[in-house]
Amino acid sequence: MGGARKDSRTSEPANQRTGEKAIGGGVWYTGFGGGEGGIVAQVGWPMTLDELQRLINEMYSDKDRTRGSAATFMWLNEEIGELAAAIREGSHEDKCGEFADVMAWLVTLANVEGVNLTEAIKDKYGEGCPGCGRLVCTCDAKS
């Protein structure tokens, strides 16, 4: 922890990735999917889960599918370990970075497995707690 944050997929400093330009409240990514230098995706903030899933897919899908589910799951677990260390002794910035990494790798695994996370969450939690069916859980389990 500490030092310049790195993008765990590229080993580049997170603020120096190529093709990233801040424009009017969002980030435009250039140079992938649509040819060199072409603007192909805008990421607005706040971002929906569907948008995040599409963004991660666009940025990493070739590598992710080649790596496969088992190796992607191992990367997710490594990031969860880094998050645990940040929660135990890291700064707020460290925690934010590790939460973002865990989310990105979870989304990656969902993409590799063909799972739409928005639909999965809606199906499981859209009507309340899966155990008791209430919006505010009254289950005894996992209290």
Image: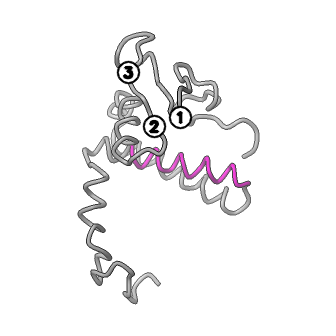
- Given the image, on which type of amino acid does mark 3 rest? Val
Q: Is residue 138 left or right of residue 20?
A: left
In this figure, which residue is indicated by the disc labeled 1?
25
- Mark 1 vs 2: CB contact within 8 A: yes
Q: Residue 40 carries which label?
A: 3
In this figure, which residue is indicated by the disc labeled 2?
44
User: Which one is closest to the eye, mark 1 or mark 3?
Assistant: 1
Q: In this view, does 143 lie to the left or right of 123?
A: right
Residue drawn at x 45%, y 48% is: 74
Sequence-wise first label, 1 or 3: 1
Across and down, in percent, residue 129 comes to 32, 76
Q: Callout 3: few (<14), some (14-19), or many (20+) C-alpha neighbours within 10 Å?
A: some
Q: Which mark is residue 9?
A: none
The answer to which image quadrant residue 132 occupies is bottom left
Please report the bounds of the magenta region as a residue range: 91-107
Work out how far the residue at label 3 is from the one at label 2, CA to CA, in angstroms: 13 Å
The answer to which image quadrant residue 30 occupies is top left
Residue drawn at x 23%, y 63% is: 123
Disc 2 secondary structure class: strand
Across and down, in percent, residue 99 comes to 56, 52
Work out how far the residue at label 1 is from the one at label 3, CA to CA, in angstroms: 17 Å
Q: Is the magenta stretch mostly helix, strand or loop?
A: helix
